[in-house]
Image: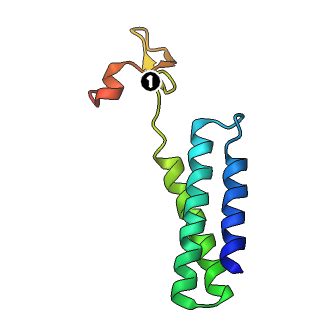
Amino acid sequence: MFTKKAILAVLMTAALAGCETQTEGQQRATTGALLGGAGGALVGQAIGGNTKSTVIGAASGALLGAVVGSATTPQRRGDQLCRYQDRYGRIYTAPCDDRYYNGNY
C-alpha cells in the first residue's frame, strides 16, 4: 500500500513540476527535490524500516536534490553582470565579456 501511495505522490509532483512559468533553475531544483525525496524515502525505509526513517530520508533527499539541481544549472552567457572601471575611474556594470567566461580576468 505504501508503494502505491509513493508512486502516486511522485507522479503528481512530476506533473506539477512541468509548469512553464518556472525558470530553468527552478525546474531543475524542483526535479532534483522530487528525485531526491523519492530516493531518500526509499533509502530511509530500507535502513530504518519505519515511518520516521522514511520521512527523514525523504526530507533529506529532497533538500539535497534541490540544492544539487539548483547548483548545476548552467549560466547562460549574457546573464552575468560584471563590474568594470573606465579610464576615468568610474565603475559601471555590464554583461560580462569572454575574459570572465574563460577565466582570464
Residue 66 visible in the shown view = no
Residue 77's image quarter?
top left
Picture coordinates of residue 78, whole percent (x, y): 48, 21
Relative to 86, residue 46 above or below: below
SS at badge 1: loop
Instruction: Give the residue type that dot 1 points to.
Output: Arg
Mark 1, Cα crowd under 10 Å, few <14 / some 14-19 / many 20+, is few
Q: Nearer the viewer, residue 94 or 7?
A: 7
| Depth order, front residue of 1/76 | 1
Q: Which residue is mark 1?
A: 77
Residue 93 in picture, x, y percent from top left: 52, 19
Left or right, residue 17 beside residue 84: right
Is 63 situated above or below 24?
Answer: below
Reply above or below: 105 against 31. Answer: above
Q: Is residue 43 left or right of residue 58?
A: left
Q: Residue at x 43, y 8 (%)?
A: 88
- The N terminus lies in which quarter of the figure? bottom right
Q: Is residue 96 above or below residue 69?
A: above
Residue placed farthest to the left in the image?
Answer: 104
The residue at 60%/66% (across/down) is 37
The residue sitting at the top extreme is 88
Which of these two is toward me, 29 or 20? 20
Asked whether residue 97 appears in the rendered view, the answer is yes
Number of dots carrying numbers = 1
Q: Position of residue 5 (x, y in %)?
A: 72, 72
Which of the 4 quarters of the picture holds residue 98?
Answer: top left
